[in-house]
Amino acid sequence: MKITDINQLKKIANNVRINIIEQVYKAQSGHPGGSLSIADILTVLYFNQMNVDENKPDSPVRDRLVLSKGHCSPALYAVLAQKDYFSKDELSKFRNIDGILQGHPDMKKVPGVDMTSGSLGQGLSVSNGMALNSKMNHDGYRVYCILGDGEIEEGQIWEAAMTSHKYKLDNLCVIVDNNNLQIDGNIEEVKGLDNIEGKFKSFGFNTIVINGNNIEQLIDAFETAKTTKGMPTAIIAKTIKGKGVSFMENKAEWHGKGPNEEEYNEALAELNQNFKNINV
Ligand SMILES: Cc1ncc(C[n+]2csc(CCOP(=O)(O)OP(=O)(O)O)c2C)c(N)n1
Ligand SMILES: [Mg+2]
């Protein structure tokens, strides 16, 4: 069911953030920062944009999502659980040997996961294949590929970008989670990308730059991508790593660790308080 009410989407995104914190706290490992930055992107995709049905996770004509930055699995798992692809009880077994939710997404174990990922740099190549298949079979499905801004330092991304252009994959939409941080520091300090939009444009993409934590802007960008013909679209989504939990925001140290009990309580208190801001 497509949700169009903006406040309802904001509430779902806030619940996704709560689920992210719960998973990494319980597991005492995982990646909260980059998961929190894509909570709004994934919420809009699964609840407003994508043609998917949780009762038919293997439908050949469903839209596909490739979470190329697979370390941010807690966000994907939270959205899939909110959509009832699997029981929410699984979330409490994140990274547990007895659960289905591994640290990185596994398409053979988790209903709703379209591609196994975690080794950065590979997702755009796979997305190209899916998008090409959709065109060759006239299936009509779209493919969404979420890349990290650190991840696009991988050379394979740019080989793949040439392929997206070569085959005029207008059913492909790349989303770069431009949170300005990678594993241990600022993007520009580690290996500067300068102008991400300019790079994608020069590789033949239609480009759109938005605030990736803004639900309305995300919907508009995805709608524009859908009507852009003859070329792939890259949405440069400017986000905040750790978004929604103040003490995690813009801090590289929250790339890959779970909070302690005190931090967990503080994070949940802030996120629960945030529901009150949504209604106004
Ligand atoms: C090929 C490969 N090299 C290294 C890693 C280890 N690694 C995991 S996350 C990460 C940083 C990614 O930064 P970014 O793409 O900006 O992700 P985000 O900020 O969204 O968490 C690295 C280097 C990996 N998963 N795969
Ligand atoms: Mg990043």
Image (cartoon, rainbow, N blue to C red):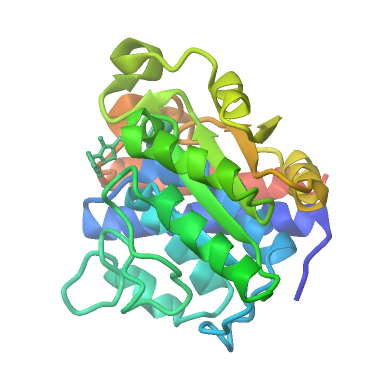
Residue 272 visible: no
Q: Is residue 127 left or right of residue 200?
A: left
Q: Residue 143, image x and y in percent?
A: 59, 59
The quarter of the rendered structure image containing the C terminus is top right
Q: Residue 14, image x and y in percent?
A: 59, 52
The quadrant holding residue 102 is bottom left
Residue 63 visible: yes
Q: Is residue 167 left or right of residue 255?
A: right
Q: How many marks?
A: 0
- Nearer-the-camera pick, 278 or 139: 139
Residue 48 versus residue 55 in the image, above or below: above
Residue 182 versus residue 21 in the image, above or below: above
The quarter of the rendered structure image containing the N terminus is bottom right
Q: Residue furthest bottom?
A: 55
Residue 159 versus residue 109 in the image, above or below: above
- Nearer-the-camera pick, 278 or 88: 88
The residue lying at 42 percent from left, 51 percent from top is 125
- Nearer-the-camera pick, 193 or 102: 193
Q: Residue 74, image x and y in percent?
A: 39, 57
The residue lying at 64 percent from left, 37 percent from top is 235
Q: Quadrant of ligand 1?
A: top left
Q: Residue 52, image x and y in percent?
A: 64, 75
